[in-house]
Image: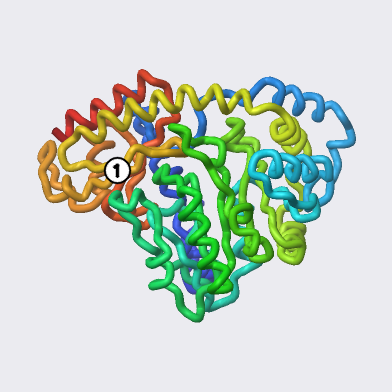
Amino acid sequence: MLVEAMPIERVSRLASAITPSATLAISMRANELKAAGIKVVGFGVGEPDFPTPSHIVEAAVTACKNPKYHKYSPPKGLPALREAVAAKTMRDTGLEIHPEQVLITNGGKQAVYNAFAALINPGDEVLLPAPYWTTYPEPISLFGGSAIPITTTTASGFRVTVEQLEAAYTSRTKALVFVSPSNPTGAVYPRSEIEAIGKWAVERNIWIVTDEIYEHLTYDEVEHHSMPVLVPEIRDKCLILNGVAKTYAMTGWRVGWMIGPSTVITIATNLQSHSTSNVCNVAQMAALAAVAGPLDAVEEMLVHFNRRRSLMHGVLSSIDGIKCPKPQGAFYVYCDIRSTLGRTFGGVTPNNSLELTELLLDQAQVAVVPGEAFGDPGGIRLSFALNDNDLIEGVNRIAELLS
């Protein structure tokens, strides 16, 4: 027996307004075509195409066999892991923190959710440079806040300026979301711009929510800098979000963390204690082996990513009507495709990036993510975290269709 849909007035209006993840939606559509026997090249979901390093897997196997990890553990995270995260943060960024300032979360997304749950009051505004990761605006809205997009372009290297931030600032501005290296654009802010933005935030007395999950994925000797290290004055109003997913090829293990002032971490811990409680202990022990161990795996991945980055950028930037700065970090190429809109390809005339994305999937069997998911209807994102043969075939299909 079919159950009729619940009338919208009978369910939460705030929850109903949340949109599904566009990256996962594209992946699902591509998988449907694959199931029908069609070869689709997927540039959608952003996750390393490498297995989790063996020493991390072995740590999980050992934990599985230990009855100690079959039980509940502290909602804040295993003490040993929080200590390891504090040590790793000092090692990798130079920021000294206490383990009590660390909350272990179910992946980076829960860290994002917890951060805005702890900060946002109804009516608050959060400055959000665009293109932005698709998840950021949703919890802001869920807790009664408003995400205020600030448009960046290829001309600025997809980096926001202090002048833009000042123009968007109001008496209701509560926080700025700062991401470097960036998903979806691959932009990495230089030291001078990070310092300027941090000092502006101090002057305006607003929070910084900085996502550093791609900290180790940079190219061409470009360096990642953590804002609270460069601008110590913001440390009391800064939340750092991070996790093991990208650096250690552990997207499915679902271990992230947030770092911040103890008062906010306590609030977020209380929230988590009533939502998910502790993160899976086995996954936490795997994460402990990851953050306490060497960075050999990510260095190996970077060799492959760097080669693929150059391959993808070379083909895409040669297509008439497409602009894409060569990314300095993460594993995405973000293209401005506005000059292709209104032109006809294969009998179809796309007028926005969503329509172009549909065209690419239908006629070239290539899955990319439309810019609408990132607050930019004139762009598309492609992940180069896939094998070389598929990558070359996919970008060549795009070039052939759009030429």
Furthest-top residue in this view: 389
Which residue corresponds to mark 1? 335
Tell me what residue is drawn at x 50 percent, y 27 percent.
302
Front residue of this view, candidates 393 and 99: 99
Front residue of this view, candidates 364 and 29: 364
Q: Residues within 10 Å of mark 1 (few under 14, many from 20)?
A: many
Can residue 144 be seen here? The reply is no
Furthest-front residue in this view: 192
Name which residue type carries label 1.
Cys
Does residue 297 appear to the left or right of 36 in the view shown?
A: right
Residue 25 in the image, given as x and y percentages of width and height: 42, 44
Can residue 180 be seen here? The reply is yes
Q: Is residue 2 above or below residue 301?
A: below
Tell me what residue is drawn at x 22 percent, y 41 percent.
322
Residue 392 in the image, given as x and y percentages of width and height: 31, 22
Does residue 163 appear to the left or right of 239 in the view shown?
A: left
Does residue 94 appear to the left or right of 399 in the view shown?
A: right
